[in-house]
């Protein structure tokens, strides 16, 4: 009997069905900060993420939240940068600090048996960080060099200009630092941001992996003991429901650029929202994956670009849709014409059930494939919490995606993409 695989016969496939993701156990630290735990002892590793609301939204001086995130971990009381990294390396642990538009996050992982050794350092990050002028000067040089390199890229400049034009330059989500603004920030202003918006700020903790009661006792000892200002409040900007720029078609020439970067978009909605699933399917069909309409037209049929992608982002109280691509400068007008043509075709012409089913199956399968580790499950849980969605949101995700009809897709195009669009070209 032969065991040779007959590659002319496709493997049997099955219709995807709803399934339930693990829900976090919700705990409370002594200082009333929430803890969300996803327990899985398959490996003796603990992943953690401490999220502080604020980020750019609470800045007194522009850029201080970003530079504070770069400085955090570069100095603690009694430990300089080298000593911190040597300490973490000795336990095989990693701690990263990042700053978003509306949050400040300390994340990392370690072996369970070293959890107490690592979480004590996280405690020091939150209450005992020290910033030296030497480290600050070094960070400034690194940031300025990275900014200089980024500003050589039309893709960076186009996205920057899109956000500035969409939100307005004075909006916290639209403003971008110049090199001169970065150089004007002082070490004392970084220290002020840390003292006013990190020390004592409310936070949430997300954990996944081999976490047990003993770990919680340790967590509560070091993070639950922090005095938190429960009255601290982050005020989010009102929803931007119209493009702020008076000029909808913006072209910026860049000397010696061989390509033009296009960014075309518009406002959408905040979450939670009843249009979320239908809009997601529409976006995927238009430009969200490699088999999308924009990819077939702009890349495969016309060869105008290596890639084109549409996406939408939902900040807290904000939401926008954007199409992004890079093309040769002399082909930018053709690319723009074809982009709008594909939007109109999706609204006006019949959508086949075959195309719809392909997109729905791709979305469901891609989601399932994304759940491949304790860390990915932690990020999914954290994302649901931030967006204000229930932790059981994905329990019926597959059936909700599969319930979207061609009429629903057309409605999303008509409702959101046939009005004014902001069009930015740099190159």
Image (cartoon, grey):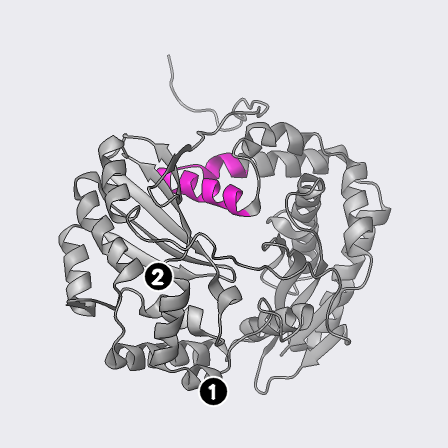
Rounded to the nearest angstrom, the CA distance separating label 1 from label 2 is 28 Å
In the rendered image, residue 56, in percent from the top left (x then y), is placed at: 50, 67
Q: Quadrant of the N terminus?
A: top left
Q: 183 above or below 330?
A: below
Residue 257 is left or right of residue 280, and the answer is: left
Name the residue rendered at 24%, 81% in the picture.
134
Return the residue found at the far top. 1
Measured from the top left, where is residue 128 in percent x and y? 25, 63
Which element is circle 1 on? helix
Q: Is residue 195 magenta?
A: no
Q: Earlier in the sequence, mark 1 or mark 2?
A: 1
Residue 251 located left or right of residue 106: right
Which residue has dot 2 on it?
Answer: 199
Residue at the image point whose x is 40% and y is 56% from the top: 105
Please report the bounds of the magenta region as a residue range: 366-386
Q: Main secondary structure of the magenta part?
A: helix
Q: Which mark is residue 180?
A: 1
Q: For residue 186, what is the image quadrant?
A: bottom left
Q: Nearer the viewer, residue 126 or 96?
A: 126
């Amino acid at each position: 009997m032969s065991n040779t695989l007959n590659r002319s016969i496709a493997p049997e496939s099955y219709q995807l069905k709803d399934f339930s993701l693990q829900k976090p156990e919700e705990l409370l630290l002594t200082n009333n900060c929430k803890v969300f735990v996803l327990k899985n002892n398959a490996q003796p590793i603990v992943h953690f993420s401490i999220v502080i609301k604020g980020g750019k939204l609470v800045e007194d001086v522009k850029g201080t939240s970003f530079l504070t995130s770069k400085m955090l971990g570069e100095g603690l009381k009694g430990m300089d940068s080298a000593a911190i990294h040597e300490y973490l390396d000795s336990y095989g642990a990693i701690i990263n600090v990042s700053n978003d538009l509306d949050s400040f996050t300390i994340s990392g992982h370690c072996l369970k048996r070293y959890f107490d050794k690592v979480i004590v350092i996280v405690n020091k990050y939150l209450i005992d960080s020290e910033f030296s002028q030497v480290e600050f000067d070094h960070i400034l040089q690194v940031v300025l060099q990275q900014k200089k390199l980024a500003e050589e890229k039309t893709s960076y400049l186009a996205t920057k200009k899109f956000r500035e034009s969409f939100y307005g330059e004075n909006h916290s989500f639209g403003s971008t630092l110049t090199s001169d603004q970065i150089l004007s920030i002082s070490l004392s202003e970084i220290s002020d941001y840390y003292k006013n918006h990190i020390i004592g700020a409310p936070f949430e903790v997300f954990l996944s992996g081999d976490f047990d009661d003993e770990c919680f006792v340790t967590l509560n000892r070091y993070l639950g003991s922090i005095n938190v200002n429960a009255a601290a409040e982050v005020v989010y900007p009102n929803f931007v429901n119209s493009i702020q720029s008076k000029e909808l078609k913006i072209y910026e020439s860049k000397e010696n650029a061989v390509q033009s970067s296009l960014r075309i978009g518009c406002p959408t909605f905040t979450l939670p929202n009843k249009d979320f699933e239908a809009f997601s399917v529409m976006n995927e069909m238009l430009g969200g994956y490699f088999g999308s309409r924009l990819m077939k037209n702009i890349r495969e049929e016309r060869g105008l670009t290596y890639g084109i992608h549409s996406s939408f982002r939902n900040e807290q109280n904000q939401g926008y849709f954007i199409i992004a691509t890079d093309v040769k400068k002399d082909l930018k007008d053709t690319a723009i014409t074809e982009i709008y043509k594909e939007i109109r075709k999706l609204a006006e012409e019949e959508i086949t059930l075959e195309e719809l089913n392909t997109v729905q199956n791709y979305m469901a399968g891609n989601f399932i494939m994304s759940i491949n580790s304790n860390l990915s499950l932690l990020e999914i849980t954290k994302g649901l919490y931030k967006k204000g969605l229930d932790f059981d949101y994905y329990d019926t995700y597959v059936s909700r995606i599969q319930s979207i009809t061609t009429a629903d897709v057309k409605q999303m195009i008509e409702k959101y993409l046939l009005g004014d669009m902001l069009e930015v070209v740099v190159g």
